[in-house]
Image (spheres, rainbow, N blue to C red):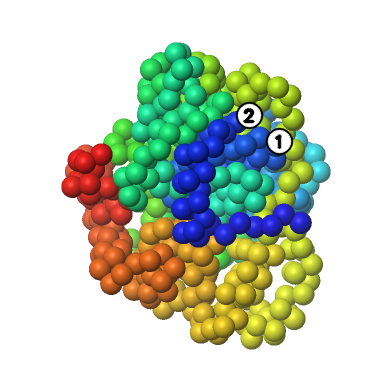
């Protein structure tokens, strides 16, 4: 059994020493799901591997997606059968072998109108969708009459549909899945570092031989040497390619996608929904005690670390969902909002909704591999392709990818624990629903949480202001999961920032107090972290009142960034 690594402050200090003194086969730049997948792929091939991420693991696109593992129905309409087939295979691997604790089936209702051709057309597409992925862990689609559809989705206007089809995909907490992939890579020997920014590339002539990496927390810099650098930076791809002194083989455009989060009781339905819009599709996705509704698809050319949702984005989503709801949603119903950027390969179209979701791998110069595009669902395939491309630089015999057979941490033993959930709940004196929630977040790693709480049962109490999470989960994020800032804890280790009416402000003080001893925060640092988080939430709320994207809006969001080096220190570097 793979032994998990604790990503605590001691690990981080040791990791900084290792990256500055060791020669690596592979240096991965970018700690989103693609970079995490590359690190795991390389490590499990037996390659010495380091991964550096300038912010928090998964802090960019990989924590701001629609949180689906899906083939993509609309790609069938675009005749992109290979992409759909590949994605459906990956969906099945996640459900059955790689991450059954994190990835779960989810149903969607596809409403039909009175157009006579629509039912046979959609049926043909869903029949193909059901069969393209091979083996399956989800049911096949079902035909529903209008009455049948309204039984499972009473929230819909009767006149908004003539019937429906019910089909299945899969979903996951993207931030937790990405983090678990990072931790799994570390368990197989990869050295992983967040708040570690590449500021330059090392060269021997025209060959890239590593990178200069800066600790964003302290300003310290070190040279990290590797046979190959793999650029997995998403919307920052072109920056690394420019740093290398070349134009690269492809370019990436950022497309902004916005989602809103509302309480589960605001939409009376037993299933998710998928609606066609004039540009794309709109999902209504079950999310525990909430619904996630999105997304938009618009160009973004401002601060890539802080994409901003605007009033126009939110109005667009509300306008489209309210066309089918009996009781319309209003701005007052929204508990959370998040915006993310898709890294799309540019060149095919000026319309971001038409740009390719396929990925591309290039070796623009010796020692540098770039990978971009793709879908969250196909991250494992992207990672394998990137490491395959790196063979020319690594030299010798490089083993083939084995990640198809590598469960993520927490997967091993998970099914048995599900069968024992009643006993586990009694043993920890917790409700069954809460034990189920923990198992679906940590799998068999749940025992590590309970070990933390053995000496202090108060850690099994809920976090104030976010009662669906336990105090021990915040502590575990600091002792095992590499959290460095309050934002990491409230936005990615938990999803308190989008699941509570206060957007985490009411929980900030309690969570900061829990982790302060582990992270070495004094009273001043605790106050700074709380103030910074409050300022970020206020800035997000303000941005959502603006009608359009603007430079001022983006600057407002970037101001309270806890990972920005103070000017006094940055000037001395």
Q: Are marks 1 and 2 in contact (CB under 8 Å)?
A: yes
Q: Residues within 10 Å of mark 1 (few under 14, many from 20)?
A: some
When asked about the image quadrant of residue 270, the answer is: bottom right
Q: Which mark is residue 398?
A: none
Q: Residues within 10 Å of mark 2 (few under 14, many from 20)?
A: many
Which mark is nearer the camera, 1 or 2?
1
> How many numbered tags mark residues here?
2
Q: Residue furthest front?
A: 21
When asked about the image quadrant of residue 307, the answer is: top left
Please identify the quadrant where the N terminus is shown.
bottom right
Q: Residue at x 37, y 74 (%)?
A: 513
Q: Residue furthest right?
A: 135
* Residue 210 x, y percent position in the rendering: 48, 28
Q: Residue at x 71, y 78 (%)?
A: 424
In primary-sequence order, the first of circles 1 and 2 is 1
Q: Which residue is mark 2?
A: 387
Q: Give the camera-side residue of 474 and 542.
A: 474
- What secondary structure is found at the residue carrying circle 2? helix
Q: Which residue is mark 1?
A: 45
């Amino acid at each position: 059994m793979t032994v998990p690594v604790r990503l605590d402050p001691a690990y981080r200090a040791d990791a900084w020493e290792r990256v500055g003194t060791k020669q690596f086969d592979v240096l991965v730049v970018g700690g989103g799901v693609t970079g995490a997948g590359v690190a795991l792929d390389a490590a499990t091939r037996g390659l010495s591997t380091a991964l550096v991420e300038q912010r928090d693991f998964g802090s960019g696109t990989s924590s701001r997606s629609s949180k689906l593992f899906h083939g993509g129905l609309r790609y069938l309409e675009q005749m992109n059968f290979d992409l759909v087939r590949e994605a459906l295979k990956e969906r099945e691997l996640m459900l059955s072998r790689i991450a059954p604790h994190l990835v779960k089936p989810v149903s969607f209702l596809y409403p039909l109108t009175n157009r006579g051709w629509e039912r046979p057309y959609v049926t043909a597409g869903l029949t193909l969708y059901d069969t393209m992925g091979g083996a399956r862990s989800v049911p096949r689609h079902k035909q529903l009459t209008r009455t049948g559809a309204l039984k499972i989705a009473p929230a819909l206007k009767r006149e908004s549909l003539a019937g429906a089809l019910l089909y299945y995909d899969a979903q996951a907490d993207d931030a937790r899945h990405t983090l678990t992939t990072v931790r799994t890579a570390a368990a197989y020997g990869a050295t992983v570092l967040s708040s570690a920014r590449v500021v330059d590339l090392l060269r021997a002539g025209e060959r890239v031989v590593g990178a200069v990496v800066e600790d964003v927390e302290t300003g310290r810099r070190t040279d990290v040497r590797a046979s190959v650098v793999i650029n997995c930076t998403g919307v920052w791809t072109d920056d690394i390619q420019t740093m290398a002194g070349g134009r690269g083989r492809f370019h990436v455009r950022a497309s902004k996608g916005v989602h809103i989060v509302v309480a589960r009781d605001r939409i009376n339905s037993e299933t998710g929904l998928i609606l066609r819009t004039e540009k794309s599709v709109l999902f209504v996705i079950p999310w525990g005690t909430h619904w996630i509704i999105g997304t938009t698809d618009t160009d973004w050319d401002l601060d890539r670390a802080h994409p901003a949702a605007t009033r126009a984005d939110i109005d667009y989503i509300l306008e489209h969902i309210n066309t089918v709801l009996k009781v319309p949603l209003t701005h007052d119903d929204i508990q959370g909002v998040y915006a993310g950027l898709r890294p799309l390969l540019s060149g095919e179209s000026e319309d971001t909704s038409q740009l390719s979701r396929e990925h591309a791998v290039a070796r623009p110069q010796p020692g540098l591999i770039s990978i971009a595009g793709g879908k969250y669902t196909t991250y494992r395939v992207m990672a394998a392709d990137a490491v395959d491309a790196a063979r020319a630089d690594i030299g010798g015999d490089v083993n083939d990818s084995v990640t198809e057979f590598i469960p993520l941490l927490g997967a091993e033993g998970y099914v048995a624990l599900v069968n024992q959930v009643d006993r586990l709940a009694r043993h920890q004196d917790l409700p069954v629903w809460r034990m189920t929630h923990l198992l679906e977040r940590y799998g068999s790693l749940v025992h590590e949480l309970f070990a933390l709480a053995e000496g202090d049962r108060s850690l099994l109490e809920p976090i104030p202001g976010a009662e669906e999470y336990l105090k021990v989960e915040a502590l575990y994020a600091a002792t095992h999961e590499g959290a460095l800032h309050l934002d990491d804890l409230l936005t990615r280790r938990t999803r308190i920032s989008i699941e509570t009416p206060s957007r985490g402000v009411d929980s900030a003080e309690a969570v900061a107090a829990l982790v302060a001893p582990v992270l070495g925060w004094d009273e001043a640092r605790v106050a700074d972290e709380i103030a910074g988080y409050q300022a970020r939430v206020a800035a997000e709320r303000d941005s959502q009142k603006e009608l359009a994207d603007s430079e001022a809006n983006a600057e407002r969001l970037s101001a309270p960034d806890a990972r920005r080096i103070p000017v006094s220190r940055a000037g001395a570097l």
